[in-house]
Amino acid sequence: MSEATDVPKEIMVRGFRLMVLGRTADERGVNLQRQGRIGFYVPMNGQEAAQVGCGLALEEKDWIVPAYREIGVALSRGIPLKTLFDQFYGNSSDVLKGRQMPCHYGYRDYRYVTASSPVGTQIILAAGLAQASVYRGEKVVSVPFFGDGATSSSDFHAGMNFAGVYNLPVLFFCQNNGWAISLPREKQTRSSSLAEKAEAYGFRGVQVDGNDFSAVYKVVRDARAQALAGKGPTLIEAVTFRMGPHSTSDDPTRYRKQETVASWKAKDPIEHLREQLLAKGWITEEGIEQVQEEAKREVQSAIDAAEKAPPPEPTTLFDDVFRDRPKLLEEQRSEFMELLKEGVLRP
Ligand SMILES: Cc1ncc(C[n+]2csc(CCOP(=O)(O)OP(=O)(O)O)c2C)c(N)n1
Ligand SMILES: [Mg+2]
């Protein structure tokens, strides 16, 4: 595992704020679903250091190709909380107009590609984006986010091989959180690490403590510099743990032991960074309390605003597919509006 080294104070403190903000938002996300206020949520609890450490090590122009669990990455990229909650609610302020599954957001302006649920697809998308950026002469890296389970997908092979052959600036960021829903990492592969799989493709593989913010930040910074120096891709395996359920549709007590969860609780990434910051004198106990209070306030105000926004107008269903709506669709739209007026359909 790589060692944590000197990461600037400003980055460490920013990382801590974002990790606390991310966890606060994440816990509310699960609760909102339990209360029936949103339809679905995919928690990242436990993976904050991996996500924020990586997110902050990237530059704004780098491409992020997320899976479904990456709220920490999204916040590190500067996507406002309100924008994210608008998507969870699928309201009229949602950039995606309520058409995507909750938690499957994407924002062109932030170079944050729409979350893709099919496991492993992020890997080939990022390889293609990297090839496009090289073709255009842009000095950027592409970063697919995926899990231990995705390393068994055929897209993993296709994307890794392609990036290796063309020496592309891709940082393959694998969060090994121990589980692919109910399938443990031990049953995923006979390889002793996921990082070592990079060797077969002819590029670097690094395993890093995914619960150590500084270690992740450093490894990603290094990999980014190498990719932009023309030295090709890196596979980064951030070893971490998913503390909560796979999604709000899952009950992890059915397949994993409480002792395992407790042993990871002792390695809490926020707690770890908090201790480092206190030891360095870079934050005080009062400062920590302030960060926690601010996070709660910010999350609450994003939720309040998202709940106030009405649902999207039902007729927006007919927008955006064709520039000029064809006759058939126009007829369907009129019929749909009639049914709404008669109350046969309700928004
Ligand atoms: C191609 C495909 N197969 C199966 C699924 C169902 N599925 C959704 S998430 C998941 C597990 C993925 O595990 P991992 O890659 O470790 O990521 P994690 O959810 O742990 O972050 C599975 C099997 C899917 N979405 N896509
Ligand atoms: Mg996993």
Image (cartoon, rainbow, N blue to C red):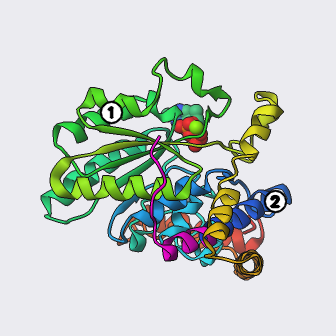
Residue 46: give its label: none
Quadrant into which the C terminus falls: bottom right
Q: Name the spot of residue 109 as percent of width and height, x first.
A: 40, 74
Determine the residue positioned at 59% across, 50% down. 211
Looking at the rendered image, the disc whose residue lies closer to the viewer, 1 or 2, is 1
Q: Foreground: 312 or 144?
A: 144
Q: Please state which amino acid type lies under the numbered disc 2.
A: Asn
Mark 2 and ligand 1: say if the CB distance to the nearest ligand atom is below 8 Å: no
- Secondary structure at badge 2 equals helix
Give the magenta range. 1-17
Residue marked by disc 2: 31
Q: Does 106 sit left or right of 291 as displayed? A: left
Q: Please state which amino acid type lies under the numbered disc 1.
A: Ala
Residue marked by disc 1: 198
Q: Foreground: 150 or 266?
A: 266
The relative height of residue 303 versus residue 67 in the rendered view (above or below) is below
The answer to whether one can see residue 104 in this image is no
Q: Does 331 sit left or right of 42 as displayed? A: left
Outermost residue toward the top in this view: 190
Q: Name the spot of residue 254 as percent of width and height, x first.
A: 81, 29
Outermost residue toward the right in this view: 35
Determine the residue positioned at 35% across, 72% down. 324
The number of numbered discs placed on residues in the rendered structure image is: 2
Q: Foreground: 332 or 346?
A: 346
Q: Name the spot of residue 2 as percent of width and height, x first.
A: 44, 45
The relative height of residue 260 versus residue 40 in the rendered view (above or below) is above
